[in-house]
Amino acid sequence: MHSQAIKLTETTRFHVWLLIGSGIVAAAQIGNVIISLPLIRADLGLGLGVAGLIVATFATLGASFGIGAGALVQRLGVRRSLIGGMATIAIGNLIGAVAPSEFVLLTARVVEGVGFFGVVLAIPTMLSRITAPGDRDFIMAVWSAYMPTGIMLMLSLGHLLPMIGWRNLWLLSALLTGICSALLAICAPAAPARAPERAGQFLDEITTVVRDPACRVLALAFFAYSCQIFSMAFALPLLLTSAHGVSLGAAGFLSALVLAVSAIGHVSSGFMLRAGVPVWANLAASFGFFVISSFAVYGGGLSPLVVVLSAALALGVGGLAPGALYAAAPQAAPSASAVPQTIGLLQQASNLGQFAGPAVLGLWVEHFGWHVAPAIVAPVALAGFAAALVIRGATHRQTTVRARAGQNIKR
């Protein structure tokens, strides 16, 4: 019996790292277009507008169909969505590798995006099912680092790209995702059978999640976080070059390092949650640092080094937020079957923030200058801080109700 328990533990550990690794592979598909864009523009003669659309394809799909995609994943089955999603990414990469025009490349990115959401919505649902309650918060927090890790791994290939070419990079991505899909088909944990659906259940599941106050508060917090991190990732290279006279190469390198620090924050949230730090405290610390850093980064008067260190600290501490939110999602879902839809809602809120944050900040700075940026950035961070306090109040009420229920049972 003892050896069997060890075997089960080792099997679960393998499944966890297989799933997290698959998410990193999926997230690398965002990084490959970012690092390849200069070569793609030169090869296909793309304008900035089309290039930006190709980069933003994943965000467009997520902002438009996030919660619907979560419901669809639940309907198809998380294991099937995971394996099929990774295979779809591979197909999209193959199409992109031979794309003769921007239209075909954009189509390839749409195909990749559909596969991407099949993967990243299925994985956290599966992780929440296969991990023990005592480990779930930590594992979900570690999972949240999949995005910056995948992007940074792909960005690290930048110095090799002129030698291998962007089309070969797409072929390598297709090979990697194809292998990953096959590995998942062989090794991914089985999912429980889904009961037959009644008519209209698909829309009812979405409506239930959207109407749930806890799900809406988590979505608001994820929107605020996404606004902060993507605004800073978008603004930092421009700020360093235009306002501080830093060279473009140095600004890009420093910005990549700052983004890498955020991954440390994602993983750290797992240790914080395991140590007993509540979700709301992780969120409050994250958004509190975002408020302070907005004045240090954008306010002017500080050296480039201090600006970069402030941004790194903000993204590092700010990385506590997504880990806490992913950990809270299974508990906040109205039912166990609604976990994919809840995560889909968070993904949709994240992608809306990815759109709104850089766009609004760019327009604001264009009209008023960098020094006025805190006036638009800090209020969004304060909204996230308020969401943390709402979560704290809800958690306190749940604890009180459970304590009273336990006292009544003893009586």
Image (spheres, rainbow, N blue to C red):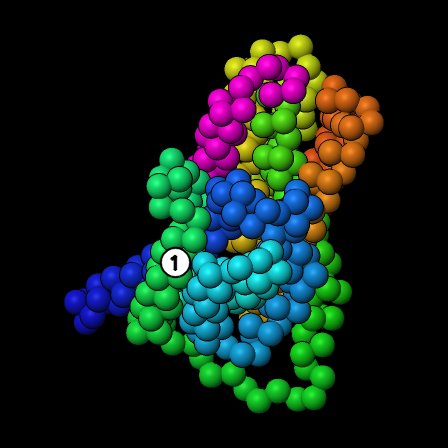
Inspect the magenta stretch and tell me whether residue 252 lies in it.
Answer: yes
Relative to 131, say whether 233 is above or below: above
Q: Label 1 is placed on what type of residue?
A: Leu
- The answer to whether residue 403 of the structure is visible from this angle is no
Which residue is label 1 attached to?
Answer: 171
Q: Residue at x 44, y 79 (%)?
A: 192
Type of secondary structure dominating the magenta stretch: helix
Q: Position of residue 82 (x, y in %)?
A: 45, 69
Q: Secondary structure at mark 1?
A: helix
Relative to 224, say whether 74 is above or below: below
Q: Residue at x 54, y 62 (%)?
A: 108
Seen from the viewer's position, the closer of residues 208 and 244 is: 244
Position of the N terminus, as image quadrant, is bottom left
* Label 1 crowd bin: few (<14), some (14–19), many (20+), radius 10 Å: some
Please give the range of residues in magenta.
Answer: 241-268
Q: Residue 73's quadrant in the figure?
A: bottom right
Inspect the magenta stretch and tell me whether residue 275 lies in it.
Answer: no
Q: Position of residue 156 (x, y in %)?
A: 39, 38
Q: Residue at x 73, y 34 (%)?
A: 362
Q: Residue at x 57, y 62 (%)?
A: 104
